[in-house]
Image: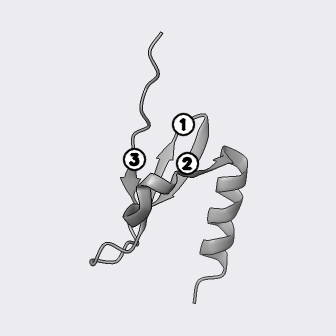
Amino acid sequence: MTKREPHWHKSSYSAQEGSCVEVAEGKAVLVRDTQNRVLGHIDYTAEAWASFLRGVTTHRA
């Protein structure tokens, strides 16, 4: 069995100069800094990620 690489995509709110995060969604949600990919990623459960997104969208100005 081979290990599949995550499918990363940039945040739709990323700045044009490249200051952004990338997300890979699957069994876990992986988040990494686009400019520092070699530092690895943080993984979240799908429930934790959904809760984070709800909080962000609820508290928008």
Disc 1 to disc 2, C-alpha distance: 8 Å
Viewer-nearest of labels 1 and 2?
2
**Mark 1, secondary structure of its residue:** loop
Q: Does the image show residue 38?
A: yes
What residue sits right under mark 2 in the picture?
A: 30
CB atoms at circles 3 and 2 under 8 Å apart?
A: yes
Q: Does the image show residue 11?
A: no
Describe residue 7's horizontal placement relative to residue 31 as left or right: left
What residue sits right under mark 3 in the picture?
A: 8
- Type of amino acid at the residue the image marks with label 3: Trp
Relative image position of residue 52 (x, y in whole percent): 67, 63
In the picture shown, does residue 21 fall above or below 47?
A: below
Numbered circle sitting on residue 45: none
What residue sits right under mark 1 in the picture?
A: 26
Count of numbered circles in the view: 3
Relative image position of residue 50 (x, y in whole percent): 65, 55
Relative image position of residue 54 (x, y in whole percent): 66, 65
Q: Earlier in the sequence, mark 1 or mark 3?
A: 3
Disc 1 to disc 3, C-alpha distance: 10 Å
**Mark 2, secondary structure of its residue:** strand
Q: Earlier in the sequence, mark 3 or mark 2?
A: 3
- Type of amino acid at the residue the image marks with label 2: Leu
Give the position of the C terminus as an image quadrant: bottom right
Q: How dense is the environment of label 2, judged by Cα within 10 Å: few (below 14), some, or many (20 and up)?
A: many
Name the residue furthest left: 16
CB atoms at circles 1 and 2 under 8 Å apart?
A: yes
